[in-house]
Image (tube, helix red, strand yellow):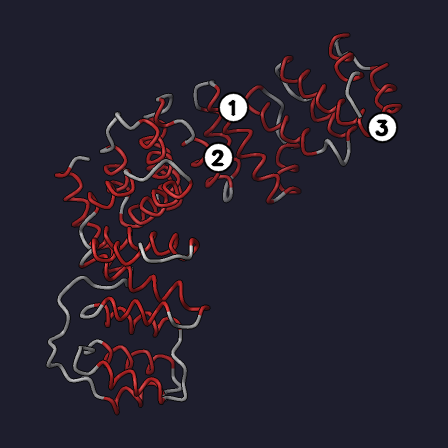
Amino acid sequence: MNRLLLGSLAAGFLVMAFFLGRQSVGPAPSPNSPLRPDKLATALGERDWVERTYGFSEEIRHLNPSNLVEALEVIEDSSAELTRDEKRLLVSAWTRFDPKGAFEFALFGPEKDRRRVAGAVIYAWAQRDPMAARSALLGIQTTELERILEERFVLGWMSGGGLGDAHDYVEGLPPSKRRELLVSQMARALARESAQSTIDWAESVGSDQERFRRTVFNKAAGALAEYHRDRAVAWVESNFGQSHTRGSVRLVALNWAESDPDAAFEWLSSLPNDEEKSEAVGFVFAYWLKSHPEEAAAWLEARDPGEALDPAMRAMAHSKLESNPVLAIDWAHRIHDPGTRERTLVRVGQAWFGKDPNATRRWLEVSDLPKAARKRILETRR
């Protein structure tokens, strides 16, 4: 990684952490600052949520080793149970001076709050002492909990100014879905800060790790599409066709299609014709068809058939294989490319033959499919 570049990115990330309302990495209040038990108890008894939140935060910010037990006793004696957010605030303040104790408190708390509360500890701990926080994670035996806490660990490390080290940690993990998820979380955190920080981070990855480089680029493109679509489109376009960017087009288009499918598919149509473009059209339309079938079908029905939409027509035909073979055949006939059209018709015919051989034979008698294609359909095993 380019350390000078990542150093500047880390500085910006600290600003982002503040505005997101996450735990500050600034100095803790003086140990001599007073925590007023009576005020804490009053805050916990407040019915007005604003006043309760303000009063609780004001007292907990003065938490230190000398008043921790007293504060916990007040909380224990209160008839009002702490909310999950209040527990996160409590352990974040506690982590400033006793992260191990705060972590144990979180792990032995109610299971329904464990992930979020323990995550708050790990996030704050990683801001100040990432190696110690990582050591604590090694003792977690629950795979699902460890996965979630590792995400908070990496994000806390980044927020504390360790973007370069956090990146190196993730890059050093074996290729896996777990690593991809961590890269995705990093990309989203950076994209919430700024488009340029995200682009600079992705472009700082060396070409000697081609697979990891592609993962970072794709996750960055997807995150940018969510927060800075125009920048995502321009960035992906400028890198289109390079090996490490493969897969990014469909991620940008997928995000775009959820709000403006016309614009998303128009953009896809404007890209140079190649396999990635074709895959993106098919992938995005199939996803849209699954999530909003009526809307997607109506949109495609209103489009003029053409080579750019062949993957969408194919996806539409495949979606009707089981429920309505006749309609699937109709969609397949709209495919512009002869080879793609024939392969799709054969697949539809094979699915139909497996369910209703007689109806399939009647269709084949009037079909203009080549003899070899018909033979493949009739040889389908039921």
The picture places residue 157, in percent across and down from the top left corner, at 23, 52
- Which residue is at a point 50% across and 39% down the rendered structure image? 257
Q: Which residue is mark 1?
A: 278
Q: Residue furthest top?
A: 371
State which mark lies toward you, 1 or 3: 3
Q: Which residue is mark 2?
A: 264
The answer to which image quadrant residue 299 occupies is top right
- Upstream in the sequence, badge 2 or badge 3? 2
Q: Which residue is mark 3?
A: 356
The picture places residue 275, in percent across and down from the top left corner, at 48, 20
**366 or 6, nearer to the observer:** 6
In the image: residue 11, left or right of residue 217: left
Is residue 191 depicted above or below 69 in this figure?
Answer: above
The picture places residue 144, in percent across and down from the top left corner, at 44, 54
Q: Disc 2 residue type?
A: Ala
Question: Distance from label 1 to label 3 (Cα)?
Answer: 32 Å
State which mark lies toward you, 2 or 3: 3
Quadrant where the image shows the C terminus:
top right
Is residue 228 depicted above or below 89 in this figure?
Answer: above
- Upstream in the sequence, badge 1 or badge 3? 1
